[in-house]
Image (cartoon, rainbow, N blue to C red):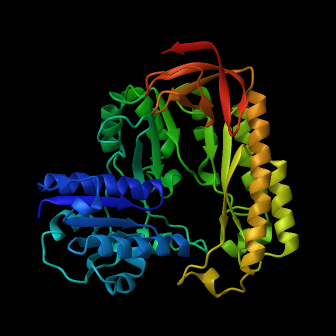
């Protein structure tokens, strides 16, 4: 056995797990290949946040087994943790290793398995895989570093705590060492986690995410840090002030909302009310007037009435969002919400359409407000695009080397992007 191929499904955390798996397999002497048809071992690192995600995995298993019947398929990740028997019954699957056994995969792949299952109690898990997600060729410009895993919340719609386990944090020294190494190659680094704002809460003492970020800024040469999703109530005044005061932190706030209806949030078992959420968003905008403000929003949660959706729509419309990730509710077996009265699928999809239209309008308004401004941005692969600190894609007037921080004078809008006038492009 000498070659392997990995496919990652789902969120940034899953991508980070896959990067660590790749490093672990390579350390055991296996070689990564670019096509699964060339691989002796195929590792599918799965997501299970929706039924659509599950179906994508099953389709992938069938396709790989059909086109490469001799490949040994190893399925891991969240779907593997949730429904191992379902996956193990599929033709071609040699091993199902849940998140509880993901760190052991570099050793397990050498055993001659045939439909075996390696899944344990995820709540006994104390460590997690962590490796920066960066392209092996060195041309990825915004590596993602997972510094936290698991979640202690118990939202009624979410399967993630039962497949990821308790919240646990990467040690500060490890994070700083990884950021220091990445900063030698990249201008911008994205910090991520399943519940990023809870970093440090599992340690003794009073370590908080703001403390870690402050140390990163003091002890590494990173030019720009960007935070991925942070729960609204974890955007403390201290964290927001730090973000506002440092020109090395991207002005980008992403806080999951899910619903703007108080009654729906209660049924979801979310730990805030709309007024609390609005307070955090308005505080962020007060400190950072041009910051990106994004949210995850769910439509068609069980029992959502027309009045509750209208309440949520009005709440979202009133806040200064610059983009939304809108999701249609999907039943997850084993969650409390799955046994609640369900909203018809066609109604869920229509509400998704309405919210996405609102999101498009808000994003256009935000982009229009940036015309004539100078924005700091990191150049992306390909040379003709950049991403601003406040999370806007920019089409450049002329090619630039990738992985640079530049100042861009915004001249207009084309499609879903800003465009550069070409008048200013100052390298830092």
Please tell me which residue is depicted at 40% across the width and 50% down the height of the picture. 146
Residue 320 appears anywhere in the view: no
337 up-or-down from 36: above or below: below
Given residues 213 and 398, the one toward you in this image is: 398
Residue 17 appears anywhere in the view: yes
Q: How many marks?
A: 0
In this rendering, position of residue 220 left or right of residue 312: left
The x and y percentages for residue 9 are 43, 62
The x and y percentages for residue 133 are 37, 46
Query: Quarter of the image holding residue 92?
Result: bottom left
Given residues 146 and 170, the one toward you in this image is: 146
Please tell me which residue is depicted at 76% across the width and 80% down the height of the picture. 303
Query: Quarter of the image holding residue 145?
Result: top left
The x and y percentages for residue 295 are 66, 52
269 up-or-down from 233: above or below: below
The x and y percentages for residue 164 are 42, 68
Please tell me which residue is depicted at 37% across the width and 76% down the height of the picture. 62
Query: Quarter of the image holding residue 376?
Result: top right
Q: Quadrant of the N terminus?
A: bottom left
Please tell me which residue is depicted at 54% across the width and 32% down the height of the picture. 249
In this rendering, position of residue 128 left or right of residue 213: left
């Amino acid at each position: 056995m000498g070659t392997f191929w990995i496919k990652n499904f789902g969120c940034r955390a899953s991508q980070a797990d896959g990067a660590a798996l790749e490093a672990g397999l390579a350390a055991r002497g296996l070689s990564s290949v670019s096509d699964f048809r060339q691989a002796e071992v195929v590792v599918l690192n799965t997501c299970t946040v929706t039924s659509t995600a599950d179906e994508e995995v099953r389709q992938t298993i069938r396709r790989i087994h059909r086109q490469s019947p001799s490949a040994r398929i190893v399925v891991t990740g969240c779907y593997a943790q949730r429904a191992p028997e379902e996956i193990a019954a599929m033709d071609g699957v040699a091993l199902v290793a849940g998140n509880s056994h993901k760190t052991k995969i570099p050793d397990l792949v050498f055993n001659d398995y045939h439909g075996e299952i390696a899944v344990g109690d995820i709540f006994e898990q104390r460590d997690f895989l962590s490796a920066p997600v960066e392209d092996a060729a060195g041309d990825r410009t915004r590596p993602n570093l997972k510094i936290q895993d698991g979640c202690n919340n118990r939202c009624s719609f979410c399967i993630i705590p039962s497949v990821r386990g308790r919240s646990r944090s990467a040690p500060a020294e490890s994070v700083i060492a990884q950021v220091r190494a990445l900063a030698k190659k990249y201008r911008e680094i994205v910090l991520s986690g399943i519940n990023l704002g809870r970093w440090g809460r599992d340690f003794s003492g009073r370590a908080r995410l703001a403390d870690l970020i402050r140390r990163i800024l003091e002890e590494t040469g990173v030019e720009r840090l960007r935070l991925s999703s942070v729960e609204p109530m974890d955007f403390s005044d201290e964290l927001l002030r730090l973000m506002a005061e440092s020109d090395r932190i991207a002005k980008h706030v992403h806080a999951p909302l899910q619903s703007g209806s108080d009654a729906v949030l209660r049924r979801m078992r979310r730990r805030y009310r709309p007024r609390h959420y609005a307070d955090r968003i308005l505080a962020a905008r007060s400190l950072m007037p041009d910051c990106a403000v994004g949210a995850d929003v769910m439509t068609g949660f069980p029992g959502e009435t027309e009045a509750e959706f209208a309440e949520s729509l009005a709440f979202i419309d009133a806040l200064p969002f610059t983009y939304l990730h809108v999701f249609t509710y999907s039943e997850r077996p084993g969650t409390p919400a799955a046994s609640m009265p369900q909203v018809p699928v066609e109604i869920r999809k229509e509400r998704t359409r309405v919210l996405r239209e609102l999101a498009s309008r808000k994003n256009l308004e935000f982009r229009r407000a940036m015309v004539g401004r100078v924005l700091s941005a990191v150049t992306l692969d390909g040379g003709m695009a950049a991403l601003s600190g406040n999370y806007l894609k920019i089409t450049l007037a002329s090619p630039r080397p990738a992985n640079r921080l530049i100042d861009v004078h915004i001249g207009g809008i084309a499609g879903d992007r800003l465009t550069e006038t070409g008048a200013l492009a100052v390298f830092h």
